[in-house]
Image: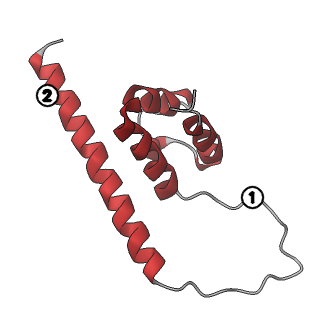
Amino acid sequence: MSKVKLLLDVVSDMRSLADSIEVVCKAMTESDAVPEKVPATKTETTKEPEIPLEKVRMVLAEKSQLGFTAEVRAIIGKYGADKLSAVDKAYYADILKDAEVLGNG
């Protein structure tokens, strides 16, 4: 593997780490604020709660830091994207399920 390729991998990993740190910071600041509860109305239908990008990013960053970077990239590629922000929100639950098995098997 060439030195340039290794350096590019390091840069990519550092960007991923920076994104993960940003997600953690946002999650910490959001947890400090108390969200207002909105009473549910009878006309609302029950559906699966929407999974935020930050949660998916945090889970994948943890797996990447545990040494599963290639597998994380493969999961993202499985859903037709080269980066997480390009994945359709509808697949976030599936991505979390795929990531859950990393390191458990």
Label ID, residue 48:
1
Question: Is residue 53 shown above or below 41?
Answer: above
Question: Which residue appears at 56% of the width and 84% of the height?
Answer: 35
- Tell me the quarter of the picture where residue 68 sits: top left
User: Residue tagged by mark 2?
Assistant: 7
Q: CA distance from mark 2 to mark 1?
A: 41 Å
- Tell me the quarter of the picture where residue 64 sits: top left
Question: Which residue appears at 55% of the width and 27% of the height?
Answer: 78
Position in image of residue 33 (x %, y %): 47, 84
Residue flagged by tag 2: what amino acid is it? Leu
Q: Look at the numbered disc 2 and give the secondary structure of its residue.
A: helix
Residue flagged by tag 1: what amino acid is it? Glu
12 lies left or right of 78: left
Position in image of residue 100 (x %, y %): 58, 39
Question: Which residue appears at 88% of the width and 77% of the height?
Answer: 43
Colour scheme of the picture: secondary structure
Question: Which residue appears at 64% of the width and 40% of the height?
Answer: 94
Q: What crowding class fits label 2: few (fewer than 14 Cα within 10 Å), some (14-19), or many (20 or more)?
A: few
